[in-house]
Amino acid sequence: MIPEIRQFFERHIGRAGAGVPDEARCMQLAAAALLEEAVHGELVCEEMEVDEVHLAIGQAFDLPREQLEAVIELTELEARQDEFCCEFGDLIRDHFGRDHKARLAEMLWLAVYAGDGRVDEFERDLVVKAASMAGIQDEELRAAFAQVAGTRH
């Protein structure tokens, strides 16, 4: 495992569920990291699609710029070292319980909805891939989609 990813996770994401006042921020960072990992794992991905993911994350979550940039840098480092590695996904899968994964599923859908208020095929596939990496069950992902889509219409 890339030590920088583990350190970032422990410092900023792994505290979710520990009663920290900024738990929502931890969940947002977790969603951002998963989406970034998923987009870097795409074999055929246009630069425009990567930019759209960055924009959507920025619009969906009011994350500090330095944290978001750190997530992007770490997932780019990860992608350079391995064709498709999902270290953030592994950490989330191993450290988040079912309730946190369900909330995380909602965050993933919120992020892809943020750009233009709809979910295209690329975005849907990205969320499904990110959820799979994090061990989010299909029924949790479907329920989160229904919840988020219901609030959008």
Image (tube, rainbow, N blue to C red):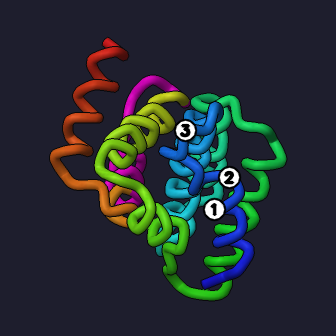
Residue tagged 3: 19
Q: What residue is shown with label 2?
A: 12
Residue at the spot x=66%, y=48% of the render?
51
Q: Residues within 10 Å of mark 1 (few under 14, many from 20)?
A: many
> Image check: 60 left or right of 119?
right
Residue most extreme to the left: 139
Residue 33: image location, x then y, percent: 58, 56
Q: Disc 2 on helix, strand or loop?
A: helix
Q: Earlier in the sequence, mark 3 or mark 1?
A: 1
Residue interval drawn in magenta: 115-130
- Image vertical order of residue 110 relative to residue 26, above or below: above
Q: Is residue 144 left or right of residue 22?
A: left
Taken as a whole, is the magenta stretch helix, strand or loop? helix
Residue 132 location (% of width, % of height): 32, 62
Disc 1: which residue: 9
User: Is 25 placed left or right of 42 in the picture?
Assistant: right
Disc 3 to disc 1, C-alpha distance: 16 Å
Q: As displayed, is residue 126 above or below residue 2?
A: above
First along the sequence among labels 2 and 3? 2
Q: Secondary structure at mark 3?
A: loop
Q: Amino acid at mark 3?
A: Gly
